[in-house]
Each structure stands twice: as C-alpha cells, then as structure tokens.
Amino acid sequence: MTLGTSSIGYSAATVLSITIGCSPALAQSEIFEGQSGTISDLGDVIQIALPAGALIGSLWIDDTEGAWQLAKGAAATGIITHTMKFGYERLRPDGSESNSFPSGHTSAAFSGAAYIHHRYGNAWGIPAYAAATFVGASRVWANRHYVDDVLAGGSIAVFSSLYFTDPYNNSALVMVPSFGEDHITMKG
C-alpha cells in the first residue's frame, strides 16, 4: 500500500490536533501567556495610588467638596466599568477570564487622573494622566487587556469626571493691582 503526501499531511495534522487537544499547555504560545513583573506590579499600585492620592490631596487642602466630587466620579466609573465587564464577557488576551472589556485598572487610574486635571488644572493633571497612561500600557504589556479595553476604561473615567467635577475655586487667591509710574501690573 502506498501513501500519498496528502494522506501523510492529513495524518500529521490529525495527530497534532489530538496532541494539542489533550494537552492545552502545548497549545499556548508565549504571546498568549500573561506577563508579570515590575511593570505589571507598578501598574497595580498606581491604579490605586492615583485616586487615593487625589483624595488625600483634596482633604489636605480642605477641599471637601472636591473629595465628594472625586467619590461620585470614581463610584460612577466603577459601576459603569464593572457592569460592562460582566455584560460583555470578553475573553482576556491571556485566555484567563472573560472580563477583559473595559479595563478596571485603567478606569480606576484615569478616574484619579481626570479628577486631578478637571479640578486642579494642567500642572497637576498632565503628570497624573502620564501615570494613568502607564497603568493602561502595563495592562496591555501584561497581556491582560487589548488596547480598546484600556481606551474604553480611560474614556469612561474621563467622562464621569467631566460630569461630576468642577474646577477648584481657591478663594484664598487674591489678585491686587500694582500701580507704577509707567505701568500697571497684577500681583497675586
């Protein structure tokens, strides 16, 4: 009996699929597996540190109204994020769970960053957004989320913050005109 190349190829494919089916560990590639380490661990810490730091900072300067706005925005962000997470049931890139969309770590980090930006301005907001972006990138790097997961998580937080947060009005800041011989300036 002679075997043609097509039947040998078919037999090899059958043996390979049976082997992979019996041993799921062989089916996973390095790309499919999650990564851990310093980048992932830092992302885990920063996602909590940003909103917690925003809250502590607001309370430090006696901005209780801002702290309340942060709490409302963070609560709305969490509720929306986790409702969508369990509604969509998207499989994570590492195949571990079906709750990838949207990214909860990223929405938590951006909740703090967006509040800081909307409440206190660019000087504090830009570094906070950089830290939140690192969190999102760490989630993609760790193979726990797709890029659109982190974009959605960040967007939910920014829009929630826009809804709940008003700019800080520091009534202690007073502008006083200063008159000179040939000029008028404002001093604060």
Image: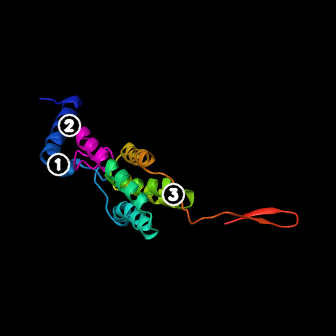
- Amino acid of disc 3: Tyr
**Quadrant assignment for the C terminus:** bottom right
Cα distance between the residues tagged 3 and 2: 66 Å
Residue under circle 2?
Answer: 13
Q: Is residue 87 visible?
A: yes
Q: Which is closer to the viewer, label 3 or label 1?
A: 3
Which residue is rendered at x = 26% and y = 43% of the image? 83
Residue 120 highlighted magenta (yes or no): no
Considering every residue shown, the one lying at the far bottom of the view is 60
> Which quadrant of the structure image shows residue 84?
top left
Which residue is rendered at x = 30% and y = 50% of the image? 78
Q: Give the class, few, some or many, for how many residues have Cα within 10 Å of label 2's Cα (few <14, many ≥20).
A: few
Q: Which residues are magenta?
A: 78-102
Cα distance between the residues tagged 3 and 1: 55 Å
> Which quadrant of the structure image shows residue 39?
bottom left
| Mark 3 / mark 2, whichever is N-terminal | 2
Residue under circle 3?
Answer: 168
Q: Secondary structure at mark 3?
A: loop
Instruction: From the viewer's perspective, tell me whether residue 98 is left or right of residue 130.
Output: left
Residue under circle 1?
Answer: 24
Residue 85 highlighted magenta (yes or no): yes
Q: Secondary structure at mark 1?
A: helix
Q: Position of residue 52 (x, y in %)?
A: 37, 64
Q: Secondary structure at mark 2?
A: helix
- Amino acid of disc 1: Pro
Q: Give the class, few, some or many, for how many residues have Cα within 10 Å of label 3's Cα (few <14, many ≥20).
A: some
